[in-house]
Image: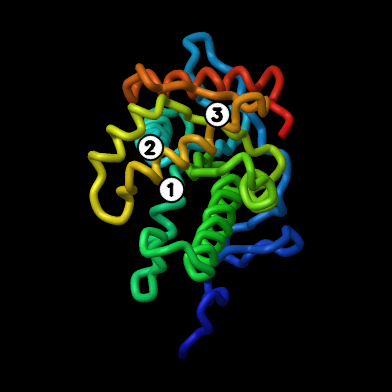
Amino acid sequence: MQHAVGAPQPGGPTPPQGTGVSTGHFPLSSPAPVQVPAPHGNGSLSGASHGPIAVLLIGAAGAGKTTIARHWADHRGAPTAHISLDDVREWVRAGFADPQAGWNEHSEAQYRLARRTCGFAARNFLANGVSCIIDDAVFPDRPAVGLGGWKRHVGPGLLPVVLLPGLDVVLTRNAERTGNRRLSDEEVARIHGRMAGWYGSGLPIIDNSQLDVVSAAAALDRVVARSAQGPPIW
């Protein structure tokens, strides 16, 4: 006997009722404030007794956000997921709209779809007790699409942190890239210039020009810990 995809199977768990939307058999609550854990004595974050947290790591191409986000997630003392917008965007194979071939309504639509998918995944992780860190190049001059969009997708407790190394560092790192993630020097410089608009925004900014991955992840850890005393208003 066949069963509809996503329907409860005989003898299997039944999705909870009255808990909002569900994903498979896992409850997916509506966006709600995300808890930020207090630091332990050694400065590391276990989060075991404070609930999951959600971090949005912002940076230009070549800023190191994906590498740092992955390292931070790997070394936390609590279950943590890393969600890379570019990875999710590249799930589209046939029909992939490569922005390098020209920005148009198709590439814009796929970026929006990837952001909604990342937000959905983040909410599901949080609802099931798993913290997450998302990395994306969010521009300060597009608040409705950028931070506003992430706030709608994940919830008002999302903690945005900006990685902003010097232009020379970003250009060097971008030159080491391959495939469709490598941009022209002109495009990298343009994006980096727009990212400078985050100065004065009130968001925490990490200049990782002189920091290796471990040191930058430790700096991110400290920013998240300090936010427990007074999360930024954005």
- Which x, y percent locates residue 151? 68, 46
In the image, is 75 to the left or to the right of 104? left
Where on the picture, by quarter, is residue 223? top right
Q: Please tell me which residue lies in front, 121 or 25.
A: 121
Q: 31 or 92: which is nearer to us?
A: 92
* Mark earlier in primary sequence (3, 2): 3
Mark 1–mark 3 Cα distance, whole angstroms, equals 24 Å
Question: Which residue type carries mark 2?
Answer: Arg
Q: Which residue is mark 1?
A: 84
Residue under circle 2?
70
Q: Label 1, label 2: how many angstroms apart (C-alpha)?
A: 9 Å
The residue indicated by pointer 3 is 48
Label 1 crowding class (10 Å Cα cut-off): few <14, some 14-19, many 20+? many
**Direction front: furthest residue:** 186
- Are the residues at dot 1 and dot 2 in contact (C-beta closer than 8 Å)? yes
List x then y, in percent, for residue 161.
56, 31
- Whether the residues at callouts 3 and 2 have beta carbons within 8 Å, the answer is no
* Residue positioned 69% across, 53% down in the render: 29
Kind of element beneath mark 2: helix
The amino acid type, in three-letter code, at marker 1 is: Ser
Kindly state the secondary structure of the residue where label 1 is placed.
strand
Residue closer to the observer: 106 or 149: 106
Q: Give the amino acid at mark 3.
A: Ala
